[in-house]
Image: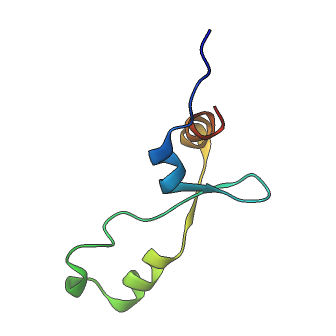
Amino acid sequence: MYKQKTRKTVMKRFKITKTGKIMRGHHLSRHKRITKSGSRRRRFKEPRQLTGKNAKIIRTLITS
């Protein structure tokens, strides 16, 4: 049986914290920024935690 490789694109998009949480960036934060309010643009900078089934899938892709 072959060794499963880590998905490099997933490694670039998600980070695992020291406590094991999976953090993600925001979508809709690159284009048409002039139409978005300043507070909305500032919120795009903060990473968000991934939870539930999606976090489980991403964890398997990163750690395999």
Q: Residue at x 59, y 24 (%)?
A: 4
Q: How many numbered badges does the structure rendering display?
A: 0
How far across and how far down the image is residue 2, in percent? 59, 14
Q: Quadrant of residue 56?
A: top right
Furthest toward the front, the residue is 2
How far across and how far down the image is residue 54, in percent? 53, 41
Q: Residue at x 42, y 65 (%)?
A: 26
Furthest toward the bottom, the residue is 38
Furthest toward the right, the residue is 19
Left or right: 60 as drawn, with respect to 13? right
Who is closer to the viewer here, 29 or 35?
29
When the figure is inspected, residue 59 is found, relative to residue 3, above or below; the finding is: below
Q: Quadrant of the C terminus?
A: top right
Q: Residue at x 50, y 38 (%)?
A: 7
Colour style of the rendered protein structure: rainbow
Q: Residue at x 27, y 83 (%)?
A: 36
Q: Quadrant of residue 60?
A: top right
When the figure is inspected, residue 56 is found, relative to residue 30, above or below; the finding is: above
Who is closer to the viewer here, 1 or 47?
1
How far across and how far down the image is residue 1, in percent? 62, 8
How far across and how far down the image is residue 35, in percent? 20, 84
Left or right: 3 as drawn, with respect to 20? left
When the figure is inspected, residue 58 is found, relative to residue 20, above or below; the finding is: above
